[in-house]
């Protein structure tokens, strides 16, 4: 019998496992890829000044209604061989002509393309974008690369990791908490439990080690990669909840 969450999804469909990842040898990468330019330094210094987990004042209202329209799109998010991890995703911005149910984890995309594609090569809205009306204000404000909905079901987790190591990262991260998962969902940045409000969008400094897990089904989030340039850093500052 096939094993659910290990070999097949809950509908019996074979899982599309992530490519096995090798540890990057940063000291062997080219200076061009690793050495920050002036724009990197300005953006990173300004982002560092803002904090590690900062709420924005962008309105999110009506997730429960939108969620019903999305039910058929959810697919397992980045399953890994031999590991049970009940996470599901829907692609919102991806490669050209992509579908909401396409794989959206970078290690899954690496299996398709041979290497991890650039976040900012995935700027095309899927048909799901217009179905999440509650996110219209957010999704029309920034310049987005790969962006997806993810939900953790009971036991679903992300182990400790960093999304970026280098100051040359092409994008920064925003995370929206959709509906009320404040009880079952736990988020830690640098081993500190962070507080989040339902239906709120946050800038998260995911250069720092973070981890999360859920004890119930449907802990839903929007994970955004925003183009890291001075314009998008200033847009973020304009919409910080706490100012002045
Ligand atoms: Fe992360």
Image (spheres, grey):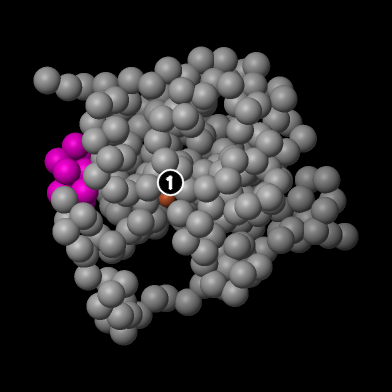
Residue 51 counted in the magenta span: yes
**Viewed as shown, does residue 17 lie left or right of 227?**
right
213 and 33: which is toward the camera: 33
Q: Image quarter for residue 195?
A: top left
Query: Where residue 145 appears, x then y in whole percent?
Result: 47, 48
Q: Which residues are magenta?
A: 43-52
Label tally: 1
Q: Which residue is rendered at x = 39% and y = 44% of the image?
A: 226
| Extreme residue toward the bottom, this view | 28
Q: Which residue is rendered at x = 50% and y = 57% of the image?
A: 121
| Looking at the image, residue 236 lies above or below residue 162 | above
Check the picture and name the quadrant holding the C terminus: top left
| Looking at the image, residue 141 lies above or below residue 31 | above
**Viewed as shown, does residue 167 lie left or right of 94?**
left
**Viewed as shown, does residue 167 lie left or right of 116?**
left
Decide if residue 85 is in sight here. no
Q: Which residue is rendered at x = 33% and y = 20% of the image?
A: 57
Query: Where residue 241 appears, x then y in whole percent?
Result: 26, 21
**Mark 1: few/some/many CA within 10 Å (<14, 14-19, 20+):** many
| Extreme residue toward the right, this view | 1
163 and 33: which is toward the camera: 33
Query: Where residue 93 appears, x then y in whole percent?
Result: 56, 44
Q: Chief secondary structure of the magenta span? A: helix
Decide if residue 118 is in sight here. yes
157 and 1: which is toward the camera: 157
Q: Image quarter for residue 84?
A: bottom right
Residue 49 counted in the magenta span: yes
Disc 1 target residue: 225
Q: Which residue is rendered at x = 67% and y = 63% of the image?
A: 17
């Amino acid at each position: 019998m096939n094993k659910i969450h290990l070999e097949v999804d809950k509908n019996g469909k074979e899982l599309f496992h992530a490519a096995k990842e090798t540890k990057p040898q940063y000291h062997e990468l080219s200076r061009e890829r690793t050495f920050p330019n002036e724009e990197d330094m300005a953006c990173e210094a300004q982002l560092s000044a803002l904090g590690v987990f900062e709420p924005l004042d962008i309105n999110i209202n009506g997730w429960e209604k939108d969620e019903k329209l999305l039910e058929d799109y959810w697919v397992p998010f980045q399953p890994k061989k031999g590991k049970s991890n009940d996470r599901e995703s829907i692609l919102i911005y991806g490669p050209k002509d992509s579908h909401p149910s396409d794989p959206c984890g970078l290690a899954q995309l690496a299996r398709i393309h041979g290497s991890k594609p650039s976040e900012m090569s995935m700027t095309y809205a899927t048909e799901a974008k217009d179905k999440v009306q509650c996110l219209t204000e957010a999704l029309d404000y920034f310049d987005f690369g790969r962006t997806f909905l993810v939900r953790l079901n009971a036991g679903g987790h992300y182990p400790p990791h960093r999304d970026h190591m280098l100051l040359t990262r092409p994008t920064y991260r925003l995370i929206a908490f959709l509906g009320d998962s404040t009880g079952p969902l736990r988020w830690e940045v640098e081993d500190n439990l962070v507080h989040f409000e339902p239906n709120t969008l946050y800038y998260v400094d995911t250069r720092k080690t973070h981890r999360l897990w859920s004890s119930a089904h449907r802990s839903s989030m929007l994970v955004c990669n925003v183009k890291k340039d001075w314009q998008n850093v200033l847009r973020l500052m304009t919409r910080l909840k706490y100012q002045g």
